[in-house]
Every structure is written in C-alpha cells, then in structure tokens.
Amino acid sequence: MTRSIESTPIRGRARRTQRLGDVIRAEALKARTLRAQTLLWVAGVLGAVTGTAAALLFASILGSIDADLPQGEIARLVARAPVAGAGIAALFWGFAAIYLTANERATGRERLTDIEVPSRRRTFTARLVLATMGSGVLALGTYALGAAVTASFGLVSGGEVLIAPGDVVGWLCVALATSLCVVWAACLGLAIRNGIVAAATHLAVFVVVPAVFGSLAATTRQDVYAWVASMMPAGRLGFVVDASREGDVLPLLGACGVLTVWFAGAAAVAWLRWRKPAVRSEARR
C-alpha cells in the first residue's frame, strides 16, 4: 500500500511528460501509415519537374517560332522556369496536404489507441509542426531538383552554370515560402473538413484569383489589380523564387512575411473550427 502511494506521483509525472511526446510520435506514425512521405514526394517532384519542363519547353518553342525575338528575352524566360516549377509544386503539395488533413475530425482518426486522448491544442500544434518541418525539407529538395533541371538545360544549350553562396540563401527562402504555402493549404483542409471544397478553395485562391486580377491589370492598366495579384500566395511565392537570385534578403523576408500572414489567418480559422467537435463516425467506447 505504501509503495503504491509513493509511486503514484512518479507515475503521474512520467505520464504528463510522455503525453506531448506521444502526440508528436503518434502523429508522425499516423502520417507514415497514410504514406504521407510518398504522396508528398510524388506531388512535389511531379509538380517541380512538370512546371519547370513546361516553362523550358515554352521558351524553346517560342524561340524557334519567333526568329526576331531577342536572345535576352529567351534567357529571361529560361531563368524564370524555376518560378513555374515552384508554383506547380506548391499547388500539388497543397492538394496532397488537403488530402492528408481534411476530414480528420469527422472520421475520428485523431484518436490514439494505446494512450489517453491528448488535448486538441497539442494535437493541432503537433500536426502543424510536422507539416511545416516536412514541407520545408521537401520544398528545399524539390526546388533543388528544379534548379538542377534548369542547370542541365543551360549546360546542354552551351551555357555556363555557376552556383554562388547567395543561391543557397535563395533556396532556403524559397523553401520557407513554399512551406508556408503548403501549411496554409493544410490549414484549409483542417478548417473546411471537406476535401473537395478545400481543394477547390485552394485552387481558386492559388490560381484562379491571381489570374483574374492579372488579366484585369493587363487590360485596364490599373496598378491596384496587379498589386492584389502579387499579394496572393502564388504571387508572393513567385516573387521569392524570382528575387532569390539577386541576393537581397530584405525583399525575400518581406514576401515571406506576407505568406506568414496568410498562414496565420488560415491557422486561426482552422483552430476556431478545430475547437468545435465534429460528428464522429465511430461510436465512443
């Protein structure tokens, strides 16, 4: 009896210490069970290669069709190919993140089997931390792959490719910006809880709305439309990728700050929705 009374505080402390670690470990194992790594890698690599190759193919076809086009214009299009690669990769990553996060509350998959169900705050924080870390690492690797494709195209074309230390800083900023876009999409899935609606919202905000405002800016010559298009997540990501080669850090940090505001807003909405319990498909035992 005495041994049981004395061991109770120790067991309670061990349980409290273990709880947050269990949440993070359980979320990581759950993501592994859902084959999140494979899905994210396929989405990122496919998006980066497809977007970069499409931009390079467009530049090559445009150069072969229009003989009067200056070589500097072709070089500018080739240099902007990683922008298309990063944008398509972020778009595909957003769809994958929505697939992994939407309907989590409705299906009851957040319930752990062998330990006490943790608080919603810790589960929500653990998922955001894992999503941010995972998308950042994958974004850095995928953008490096897109840069390698562009460098290979330059070498095949007879050019010279040099990698400066500023390029590495630019890759890190691009990885941060892409990670913020992906986690923003994950928050859409957590907030909307419907994969189709969340994917449609992500496509509208990331592609349709910037295209509409860009078209309005081109036709009406109004700077406000161009500014709105540039403040969207895709516009800020494109700016970061485009300006990452110039070596100026302050504009990159400013663009990442705008993406942080987008992420914070989506995370706040997701947290407000997360606090409301959804109807579970499983009967509580």
Image: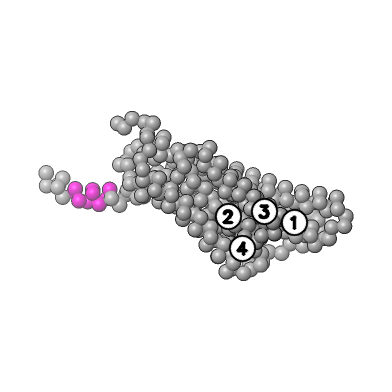
Q: Quadrant of the C terminus?
A: top left
The residue that appears at 86% across and 53% down in the rendered structure is 66
Determine whether label 4 and label 1 are within 8 Å by CB: no
The disc, 2 or 3, on the residue closer to the chain's N-terminal end is 3
Name the front one of labels 3 and 1: 3
In the picture, measured across the screen, residue 285 lies left or right of residue 131, that is left
Residue wearing tag 2: 232
Determine whether label 2 and label 3 are within 8 Å by CB: no
Determine whether label 1 and label 2 are within 8 Å by CB: no
The amino acid type found where label 3 is placed reads: Leu
x, y (%) of residue 146? 67, 53
The total of numbered circles placed on residues is: 4
Identify which residue, 135 or 257, lies in the foreground: 257
Residue wearing tag 3: 216
* Quadrant housing residue 41: top right
Identify which residue, 216 or 105, lies in the foreground: 216
Q: For numbered disc 2, what is the local secondary structure?
A: loop
The disc, 1 or 2, on the residue closer to the chain's N-terminal end is 1
Residue wearing tag 4: 170
